[in-house]
Amino acid sequence: MLSKREVFDGVPEEYLSHKERYENAIRNSVVAFSLVRKMQEEGKTSINNYRDVVGGLLGSSVLRDGSPLGLHYIMFMPAILNQANEEQQEKWLPRAWNCSIIGSYAQTELGHGTFIRGLETTATYDAATKQFVLHSPTLTAYKWWPGGLGQTANYCIVVAQLYTKGQCHGIHSFIIQVRDEETHMPLPGIKIGEIGAKLGLNAVNNGFLGFDNYRIPRTNMLMKHAQVLEDGTYVKSRHSKLNYGAMVFVRVVIVFDMVNYLSKAVTIATRFSAVRRQCQLKAGETECQILDYVTQQHKLFVSIAAAHAFRITANKLWLTFNEVNEQLVEGNLQRLPELHALACCLKAVTTADTAACVERCRLACGGHGYMMSSSLPLTYGLVTAACTYEGENTVLLLQTARFLVKTYQQLDSKALTPTVAYLKTAAAERFCVGWSNTTEGIIRGFQVVAMRVIIMSTFNEEVQEMSRTVSPQLKEVLHQLVDLYCTYWALEKLSDLLLYTPISQKEVESLRLRYEETLTNLRPNAVGLVDAFDLRDEMLQSTLGSYDGRVYERLMEEAMKSPLNAEPMLQSTLGSYDGRVYERLMEEAMKSPLNAEPVNYTFHKYLKPFMQGKL
Ligand SMILES: CCCCCCCCCCCCCCC/C=C/C(=O)SCCNC(=O)CCNC(=O)[C@H](O)C(C)(C)COP(=O)(O)OP(=O)(O)OC[C@H]1O[C@@H](n2cnc3c(N)ncnc32)[C@H](O)[C@@H]1OP(=O)(O)O
Ligand SMILES: Cc1cc2nc3c(=O)[nH]c(=O)nc-3n(C[C@H](O)[C@H](O)[C@H](O)COP(=O)(O)OP(=O)(O)OC[C@H]3O[C@@H](n4cnc5c(N)ncnc54)[C@H](O)[C@@H]3O)c2cc1C
């Protein structure tokens, strides 16, 4: 079994080279995911609840900086479930589920990530041979970013412009083998490698992929929604965006992931703040816990409230996702635009807020928060990536804005879907809502703001749900968190409220007082609230946030592990750029030591035995 803090020949992860980090990640991942296979064999899990199993592993400390197998579970398999017809699912799913093939998801190209209708990779149907010819016409058409593609995956879902009978039918998905299953060598016509070092997620093995007139069978086009018949006839999908389904699923999953990361960061920072004593509240007194400073409470407590708010929201979004997908199966597409808008908005808001909160948690820990051993810099690197992948946040919020504007324009002519029904109420009150400094009053205020600017998403507090299922004491604390979260954002977005609601100066002043009172009321329960996240030290992997509070001893123990304390200089620096972006990116990628060899030894030692069930 893996040790708590996986090391590579005695050197902690932080001090591994780029190549060693990948090799370590492969070893950790195949051992960790062998557990999933064992649970399958013992009937303790199935493809229906793989979300929890995978979520537990992919969000865990064993795979601290991501996993080369992550995309296999997070996008390759969901894409097959979402876009392959039954016959194709029967062929590919069992092999994917037991990992006898390892997949990735290749959509983004060097030249396009957001504008997917502009992707350049082509899949041209040849009726004579009943094959598709995959081709990358330019360097910018190279797939760039797919997780696990650099040295690990042997299959992937490729998104390409479909051509048949001389006509382009837009982007569609194809399942494509890119490496030999025995030798793991790239197949003829495939150019593949990894893209190089990144801000974080350096264990994910993100890759590049180019096609040189590479042929695949017609039946490798995923044909649940659209089809190409043997003679090349194109049969279009009921809805052009059903092909985008895999992205919606991942956006929903990312909201859950943010809950994990935010809970982890605020647990570390709050516990450290209870241990750390610095300066005196009154001259002559002993130094006080920094958690006693209102400024520290202002930095941290809203993150505790946000973690709960995001968890409730993620669960509600998951229910909506499943409801809408059941309707899609019955042919009812009515709520698809709402699901898309909701997934876009909540992925963007939760990732942006979590990145800001994790950075604030780091800053709240002073110099010790800047240590890699605190786990806060690593957590920030992981979270900030989520603001970009699966749809850059700006672009996704614009999609939500588009949906809200459309909804508003049809306010009187169309029944509203559940998550935007509030727009009717806000409209009916003609924006002259009386202001009240209560949770409900603040939510109503934001609904009015949303109504006016039609780009604010509203915040659906599940207060009723809490009152049914919790004890009076816990209800009081949870209400304090709800109050905190609402008053915090009311004060943060005061300009909107002042512009669009009749809130008075006096009410703003009492709101401020109420905010500070709530911080004070929450203080006695702050450590208990993060303990309630029940994150084991093995998950936190932090010198600052361990349950026993031995912060200083742990900091010193970790420092002594640095090879710099054992020997002189290490490391070197990298070259700089001359502005030729794509060529330079490719040249830099080719400098990666991982690309120096066609197949890394870990394939034969770990990956292949794992895929053959021999591990
Ligand atoms: C559960 C527990 C788990 C715990 C933790 C688990 C750990 C794992 C965590 C997760 C890790 C995740 C790793 C991910 C790695 C990264 C992968 C990637 O990044 S894959 C690539 C992602 N790329 C994108 O997201 C591209 C973004 N761009 C787009 O989506 C589109 O270009 C666009 C939506 C911005 C525009 O699309 P376009 O076709 O140009 O549409 P138009 O703007 O012209 O029209 C909009 C129109 O279409 C509707 N629409 C758009 N998209 C969708 C959709 N997906 N579904 C439904 N409808 C859609 C939209 O509503 C508009 O409709 P209209 O009626 O016309 O207004
Ligand atoms: C860690 C990581 C992992 C990834 N993994 C994968 C993967 O496994 N598979 C995969 O296919 N992709 C993957 N991606 C790629 C990711 O999906 C893209 O980076 C993302 O979609 C953004 O596209 P881009 O990078 O080309 O940026 P661009 O689309 O070029 O956008 C750059 C900037 O331009 C602005 N912009 C662009 N379009 C608009 C607009 N319409 N309106 C206003 N502003 C705009 C935004 O500010 C944006 O930040 C990954 C990315 C990262 C960072």
Image: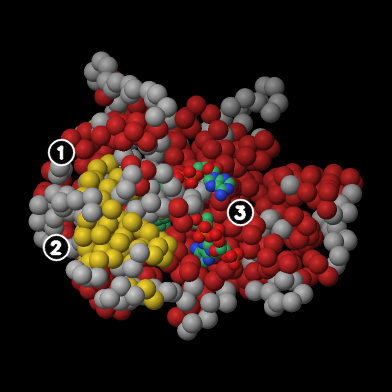
Q: Which mark is residue 597?
A: 1
Answer with the quarter of the image where residue 102 lies.
Answer: bottom left
User: Which residue appears at 48% of the width and 32% of the height?
Assistant: 369
Q: In the image, residue 502 lies at what x, y percent? A: 88, 54
Q: In the image, residue 376 lies at what x, y percent? A: 46, 38
Residue 383 in sight in this render: no
Judge: label 2 CB < 8 Å from ligand 1: no
Near mark 1 (Cα within 10 A), the count class, few <14, some 14-19 or many ≥20, is few
User: In this figure, which residue is indicated by the disc labeled 3?
Assistant: 398
- Position of residue 364 relative to residue 122, above or below, is above
Q: Are marks 3 and 1 in contact (CB under 8 Å)?
A: no
Q: What's the distance in space between the residues labelled 3 and 2, CA to CA? A: 45 Å
Q: Earlier in the sequence, mark 3 or mark 2?
A: 3
- The one nearer the camera, 324 or 379, is 324
Q: Secondary structure at mark 3?
A: helix
Answer left or right for 179 relative to 65. Answer: left
Q: Secondary structure at mark 2?
A: loop
Q: In the image, residue 181 lies at what x, y percent? A: 13, 58
- The one nearer the camera, 236 or 150, is 236
Near mark 3 (Cα within 10 A), the count class, few <14, some 14-19 or many ≥20, is some
Answer with the quarter of the image where residue 13 lies.
Answer: top left
- Position of residue 422 relative to residue 64, above or below, is below
Q: Are marks 3 and 2 in contact (CB under 8 Å)?
A: no
Q: Which mark is residue 613?
A: 2
Q: What's the distance in space between the residues labelled 2 and 1, CA to CA? A: 25 Å
Q: Earlier in the sequence, mark 3 or mark 1?
A: 3
User: Which residue appears at 86% of the width and 52% of the height?
Assistant: 503
Q: In the image, residue 536 lies at what x, y percent? A: 40, 50
What is the quadrant of the C terminus in the image? bottom left
Q: Residue furthest bottom?
A: 330
